[in-house]
Image: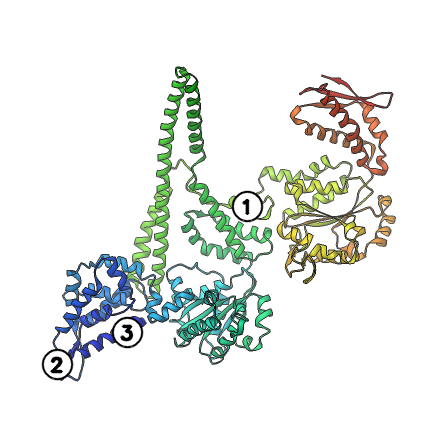
Amino acid sequence: METKYSARAGMVIKEAKDLAILHNNPQIEDLHVHLALLQQNHSPLDQVFEYFAIDKASYQKKIQAAVERLSSNPGLSNLYYSRDYQRLLLQAKEVAKELYHTSISTLHLFLALLRLEGSTSYHFLQKNGFDYQATYDYILELSQTHNLNERYPQGLAEVLKQYGSDLTEAARQGQIDPVVGMDDEINRVIQVLSRRIKNNPVIVGEPGVGKTAVVEGLAHRIVNQDVPESLRHRMIFSLRLSDVIAGSKLRGEFEEKLREILDIVANANHQIILFIDELHTVVGMGGGSGGVDTSNILKPLLARGQINVIGATTHAEYARYIQKDGALERRFQKIIVQEPSVSDTISILRGIKSKYEAYHGLRIKDEALVACAKLSDRYITGRRLPDKAIDVMDEACSMVRTEIDAMPVELDDLKRRILQLQVEKVRLKEEDSTNPEVAQLQAEIEELTDQFEADKANWQSEKRAMKKLQKIQDQIDQLERQTSQAQQEDDFEEIVNYSHVKIPKLRAQAQELLSRPYRYNLIEEVNRQHICEIISKSSGIPVMDLNQDEVAQLLNLDQRLREKVIGQEAAIHQVAGSILRAKVGLKAVNKPIASFLFLGPTGVGKTYLAKVLASELYQGPEALIRLDMSEYMEKNSVTKLIGAPPGYIGYEEGGQLTERILNQPYSIILFDEIEKAHPQIFNLLLQILDEGQITDNKGRRVDFANTLILLTSNVAGESVGQEDHLEDQLLETFRPEFLNRLTGIIPFRRLTKSAIRQIIDLHLEETVQLLADRQLSIELSPASVEAIMAGSDYLAYGSREVVRLIHNEIETLLAVAILQGQVKDRAQILVDYNDQQQFYIAAID
């Protein structure tokens, strides 16, 4: 296999030959290479000399003198290679192989000099304090930061490092997560890059679907040599245009810097692939103040095939910027990246799991990965897989890690108890120093302090064990990368050493640490429950595992609604059934949970049922979005819901409905008195009910798949119970296509006398709850109940008149009695109704 040298190392070999010619030496010696290495400016070796506190200038003079003492023969026409020089190159090749580097660098040459026993260079290095192992360890660390410098001459490398990063080197060092499930897209990119002309792919997809990951996957493929021969030695350079434009104050500065970078790439003989994330930003960038548009600088180079560029952008930005510029568009080949499925996302998470485990020092259970993909797909709207699933996994790990690092609750409680006793002791001592309780408190404090110190030492010991475990996991991760590198180079001896000796040994150590008994919960696993907790925080809905209690709550939803909404059993049964079906996934994924039109006269519980559902399903009334349709009777009212068009007042504020749903996707939307809405509102509703989403004034897709849509109407209130008349009256007011898209039309019956009695009892319980701190017991006599029912026209006004009477008569009576001191705490009160048609307190116990 041909030996490859970095640009700087190749320059050193050439300069060594020139030094031999300059000094009329008959053969190239190791000393010539030694001196050429020292003569390099801004070399990584400068840091080596600085690290070992050796004066490089004086050392260079010694080597210079040694070269001048070599034998010379001006008459010789041929230049030969000495045995030590040939040994040096072989040793450099071995060093590079040991470090798993694909090319020989100046650092490898320097280490080879330290291994060249018996040579003059070896003698000088040993005499001046260089130790091979110490130098090897330091250079191993140093070489990770100087790969770019070695591949390209110093000035060019400095420019590249200033305005971007080497993705292939980052992949080689394990700084980029493994890419799983993007093989088709990566193969398509490789195919385009291998073309003779128009070999510039642009990766197009929605934010978060993995556009950048495709390029990172290509970088991994290049490192693993799993690409065609033409791409095996390429470098992917990620250009940060923001860094290029930063600090460009005067006209032409930006263009000058960009041209310098592009010249480097163009002169690299297609060894550098330029990656421009957010490719659309090149259109117009730098074009201000008389400057040249970035895209116009790129076009000639792309047209002549002097540079290879990979771009990445979204569909919207591609259409808005790239597609409009035909000359730029035709120089790129479009590659579309679709959002991965849930199953593909699970595979991706399994592939990158080890990286997050090593970083956070935790184990991530497979059930947590499955939950990340499924729950984020279901509950986090407005974002794409796999990005949102990865974010959930990372945040769950962070949450668990934070809990582990904090002091355990029992230790914290013990510490607070000691502090409390110390404060109490000081207070007692100030009052009476001879108080025997002071000595008792001191004894208790000392006992608790000893316990605290012992427990704290145990906790810290367990924490050290966990840190050791994390270090072992990091070492395993590093050895697995080295195993992969050895497999590429067919180094079977190292493969066996890593796979069957070193890695199993470390795994045994990790297992031993994991099997120890721990008092504190430090060996944490990220499980499904942690994922549910993170999803709950981000979506605002309790997304917990359905344990037996929660299953019972769902099954009893019908009963619990009936306890609060009186007299509407049929309506409650339909609504509860639709919610149960949605909970187990028996609904179209792109439509709302359900949509119901509540019909009936005023005061029968239509709006109240919506409020109760918000409390029962989403644990709070803030989940109810109530829109009074009397405010949406004008033609332009639809802009209130989705936002004003660009250029109109209120554009920046967004729509009243769309903004709420974007921020709180799990909601109950109540369109109150829907018959009053303008027809344009119904057109919007048709789209929500049919497609489950609408587009707001800013072009954002607003998803209603996790909403429950309720509409109330007083239309046909008199016809409830008369199905023929009810349908006719509905068709007079609502369009058939609107009625057909509803899950159900639910008539609310007029309240019966028995229902009113239950409502009176229910509101009396609410009154008692308002006075809970007084612990009162309130009872109404049969006469007072009959008086409330007789005094309210519940057939016409429903329960509202009943509630009004309770407020005005019963609660006012209680308030006066409390203020006058007649009613004490824990009193039992009986309210009665007399012949003078007055409510009064008949008894107080």
Name the amino acid, label 1: Cys
Residue on which the image places disc 2:
73
Quadrant assignment for the N terminus: bottom left
| Residue 24, percent from left and from top | 16, 79
Circle 1 residue:
532
Identified by mark 2, the residue type is Asn
Q: Do the residues labelled 1 and 3 touch (CB within 8 Å)?
A: no
Using the image, determine if residue 718 lies above or below residue 792.
Answer: below
Relative to 798, does residue 248 appear above or below in the rendering?
below
> Please, what secondary structure does the residue beneath circle 2 have?
loop
In the rendered structure, find residue 11 and report the number of the disc placed on it: 3
Q: Which of marks 3 and 2 is nearer the N terminus?
A: 3
Q: Is mark 3 on a helix, strand or loop?
A: helix
Question: In the image, is 119 to the left or to the right of 140?
Answer: left
Query: Is 127 or 336 nearer to us in this picture?
Result: 127
Residue 162, quarter of the rendered image: bottom left
